[in-house]
Image (spheres, rainbow, N blue to C red):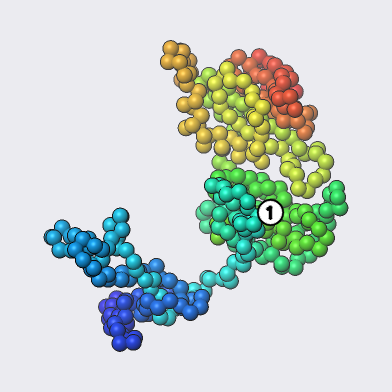
Amino acid sequence: MARVARRVRADCAGRVGGGRLPGAQAVWRDGRWWHTALRPDAPAHDDPVGRPTGLRRDRPQQPDGPGRGTTPRPDGVSSDRPRRPDGAHRGGTPLHRAAEPPDPPWLGEPVPSRPCPTCRPARRPVASVLPCATCAGTGRVHRAALITLTDLRCRVVHLAWRAGTPEPVSTASVRPGGRSVVRLPDRYRLGAWATVFGVRPEDLAEADGGHALPPDVRDGYVALPWAGADPVGEQVAAVGPALPAARLLVTAVRPEAPPLAELLRLAYGLDLALLVNVLDLRRHPVAPLRTHGVLWSVDLRPPATPVRPDDLPDRPSLAAAVAHCLECLDVTLPQTVPADPRTPVPVPRSTSRPLPPDPVPGLRRLAARHHGRPLSVRFTRAGRTVHGHDDDGPCLIAEDDDLRVPRLT
């Protein structure tokens, strides 16, 4: 470190044009120190040497009279540098490195981008305070997507999808209007990477928010807007052109959730209603771009709360739905307290209770019988009800007050 300090001081003492350089900098990169002088002159072109360092050199201001352009100090001496309202000095010149260290070996090619077509003033007649839905306010649309899959422990896979890359595709179907749906190779199917991490394709989720991946992104299906369109470019657009730094983080972790019967026992003990929403799409007509499989959602509510029209399943697996319900307990449980303080609250049952019969097999049979129709099943101490959703909202299908027999079909 002493040698680095001497070299940095020597860089500062260098003379360019008869004046002392404003500073110097030491950069640790690739296992060694790199030192360079800092100069205030602006770069003639955008190259690595001319990148700003983030450091600024204040310009001294000449006082032009008492009380004008000066800032009094606590000791009564006026400073000749004006200050901003936040106390920082006004003015300053960006400093640039005289020489840039070699790029690190992990630095890849820049992500290509183009100006956002939606943010152009000619195409945006009405000003809006909301960020652009195409570029999220960045003004640029990325032409590549950087995908990172991780199990959050020790295994990571990085993928780079670049628009314009020629790839062999297979035709999956033809949509109305003649639009072809094609399927990209395995490296563009995130669901195919799930086996590398030992999880199911439906266990893949976005790291930011835990949302399930769309089926087209997960399985590599792309709808071409016209014949000869770029399949990889359409896949990048489906992932999202407004991703921060064009990067999508995906977690490949199997949800850690208890059996549904344990959550049902908790609901009985707290005298709450356990609402299970399920939708079976396994018999749905083959459509590569549509969700398939069985969708779930689980929620705890006061027993008097009715089934709402928006009680629809949105999780790709029952384990993911139960895990999400448990994550939201800190918000859900306070909502179950009556608003009227005079309303009595049932005393939870603190005695040990055996697990109720597993309702999952009956729920699966019930969803398969009503395939393609969302169902909401409410479990309470008084019994269970089954509601079906249609265009007019939820309607009662069946009611059962016998909790000991899991007869749901």
Q: 408 and 62: which one is in front?
A: 62
* Residue name at image x 72 percent, y 30 percent: 374
Q: Is residue 91 above or below residue 407?
A: below
Residue type for callout 1: Ala
Location of residue 118 in the rendering, given as x and y in whole percent from the top left corner? 64, 55
- Residue found farthest to the left: 75
Residue 351 in sight: no
* Residue name at image x 31 percent, y 77 percent: 22
Residue 325 in sight: yes
Quarter placement of the C terminus: top right
* Residue name at image x 31 percent, y 58 percent: 84
Location of residue 180 in the rendering, given as x and y in whole percent from the top left corner? 83, 55
Location of residue 7 in the rendering, given as x and y in whole percent from the top left corner? 31, 82
Location of residue 71 in the rendering, given as x and y in whole percent from the top left corner? 22, 60
Q: Is residue 278 above or below residue 97?
A: above
Which residue in the protein does label 1 denote? 238
- Residue found farthest to the front: 65
* Residue name at image x 59 percent, y 25 percent: 274
Q: 236 and 122: which one is in front?
A: 122
Quarter placement of the N terminus: bottom left
Dot 1 crowding, Cα within 10 Å, few <14, some 14–19, many 20+: some
Q: Is residue 375 above or below residue 62?
A: above
Q: 180 and 334: which one is in front?
A: 180
Quarter of the image holding residue 116?
Answer: bottom right
Q: Is residue 141 left or right of residue 373?
A: left
